[in-house]
Amino acid sequence: VANLGYSCIAGKCKAASAKYCRLANCFDKLLSETNPIPGKTAMNLAGMNVGKVRLPLVDMDPANIEKLKVSMRGVGLEV
């Protein structure tokens, strides 16, 4: 994601667009439920062990977790 921003700042719009398109599905899944649920779920799936969300939030829907896993693998992350 940082490289996407650096490409924008450097005026490399085509490169930034290509990077965004590669990550767009993952961004979509990270916004599929109330923040910070998908972000914490993604970090836990990536092995960062950030713990569960606090009440009143609840765990991410299992169907959405599977979609998140697929999108993370699609950008080269190990889950």
Image (tube, grey):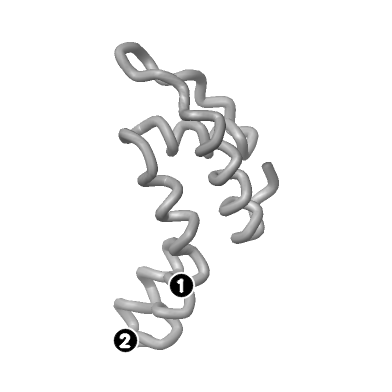
The picture places residue 65, in percent across and down from the top left corner, at: 55, 36
The quarter of the image holding the C terminus is top right
Q: In this view, does 35 lie above or below 16?
A: above
The picture places residue 19, in percent across and down from the top left corner, at: 47, 73
Q: Residue at x 46, y 72 (%)?
A: 21
Q: Is residue 71 above or below residue 38?
A: below
Secondary structure under tag 2 reads: loop
Secondary structure under tag 1 reads: helix
Q: How many marks?
A: 2
In front: label 2 or label 1: 1
Residue for badge 2:
11
Residue for badge 1:
21
Can you name the residue that lies furthest to the right here?
Answer: 78
Please identify the quarter of the rendering in which residue 76 is found. Answer: bottom right
Q: Which of 7 and 17 is in front in this view?
A: 17
Q: What amino acid is labelled 1 in the image?
A: Cys
Q: What amino acid is labelled 2 in the image?
A: Gly
Q: Residue at x 37, y 15 (%)?
A: 54
Left or right of 28? Residue 56 is left
The picture places residue 9, in percent across and down from the top left corner, at: 30, 77
Q: Which of 73 and 11 is in front in this view?
A: 73
Can you name the residue that lies furthest to the top here?
Answer: 55
Q: Residue at x 33, y 12 (%)?
A: 55
Which numbered tag is attached to residue 46? none
Can you name the residue that lies furthest to the front here?
Answer: 63
Please say if the residues under marks 2 and 1 sit with CB atoms less than 8 Å apart: no
Disc 2: CA contacts within 10 A as few (<14), some (14-19) or many (>=20):
few
Q: Is residue 41 above or below residue 5?
A: above
User: How far is mark 2 from mark 1, CA to CA?
Assistant: 17 Å
